Amino acid sequence: MILSGAASQGLGARLSTALDEELGAVEFDRFPDGEKIVRVPDQVSERAVVVASTVSDAAHVQVLQLQDAAREAGATEVVTVIPYLGYARQDQAFDPGEPVSVRAVARAISTGTDRVVTVNPHKDAVMEFFDVPTTTVDGAGRLADPLPSLEDPVFLAPDENAHSLAASVRDAYGAGAVDHFQKDRDHETGAVRIFPHDTSVTDRDVVIVDDIVATGATMSEAITHLESPARVFVACVHPLLAGNAWTRLSRAGVESVYGTDTIESAVSSVSVAPTIAARL
């Protein structure tokens, strides 16, 4: 049975269809003191698949509640699918006295599940913090589906670490070059120059590919350094798009933003349900 968190109901329904498994009638409520509660009124005979992106602190708590509710409903196995893993960028103590927040979150989630599945965590190494078996799914290839017809495209990652994401989208699209942005600092003036590593984008369609677009600040700044591209598109697995991110990208010249439904938003134009289903 598929049990969806409040922030992942669309993806839960699509995963139910992809797996041909029942979609549970999860109920969401709130007590007068503000505490939230979930209910799973149906009996779960065998496996329960909890599907919940942890886009907020409340969503993290909801994962723990869904796991426990699944056990109470009779599940003999609980698989927790976290399409977007919040706190994944807090993967170390950056200053003295700070927690490794994703480690704390992972340990809590591990107590109520037999297995965890995530989609493109910010760093694969964060999966080591879980105390149960984990599976990481690459949803980047799905981003090729909503792209328009491109002219001599360049799939461009924001840095070398994300190069493989851009390659996944290019491979799925079936044509084009792959490159990443590089930064050089002038030692005399201190000025930073941002440019594609070794590929010209002049008069070519450019697709900027990343795992997460949060504020859009870094990406929009990089886009302004492209030399005469034909068109610019953004493709991201997790379209967080916080604050005025969409405005920033639009002002930088981005025609369209394409994301998956790991985070359900206006730009979630393709589903990772088939990719997740293949690993369940």
Image (tube, grey):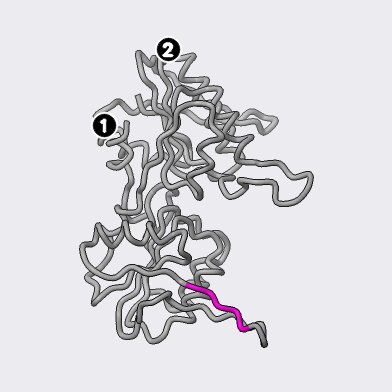
Work out which quarter of the rendered image holds the C terminus and state it. top left
Q: With respect to residue 172, does 2 lie above or below? A: above
* Structural crowding at the residue carrying mark 1, measured as other residues with C-alpha within 10 Å and reported as few (<14), some (14–19) or many (≥20): some
Query: What's the residue at 46%, 20% (across, down)?
Result: 70
Q: Are marks 2 and 1 in contact (CB under 8 Å)?
A: no
Q: Position of residue 256 (x, y in %)?
A: 37, 69
Query: What's the residue at 41%, 15% (across, down)?
Result: 75
**Which amino acid type is shown beneath numbered disc 1?**
Leu
Q: Position of residue 184 (x, y in %)?
A: 55, 78
| Residue nearest the observer in this picture, 38 or 194 | 194
Looking at the image, residue 248 sits to the left or right of residue 163; the answer is right
| Residue nearest the observer in this picture, 145 or 251 | 145
Numbered badge on residue 60 = none
Question: Label 2, on which residue?
Answer: 74
Which image quarter: residue 187? Answer: bottom right
Taking the view exactly as shown, the residue that stands out farthest to the front is: 187
Question: Label 1, on which residue?
Answer: 19
Asked which secondary structure carries label 2, the reply is loop
Q: With respect to residue 200, does 268 lie above or below? A: above
Q: Position of residue 115 (x, y in %)?
A: 44, 27
Q: Position of residue 30 (x, y in %)?
A: 60, 31
Which image quarter: residue 196? Answer: bottom left
Asked which secondary structure carries label 1, the reply is helix
State which region is magenta.
Answer: 182-186
C-alpha gap between disc 2 and disc 1: 20 Å
Looking at the image, residue 19 sits to the left or right of residue 39; the answer is left
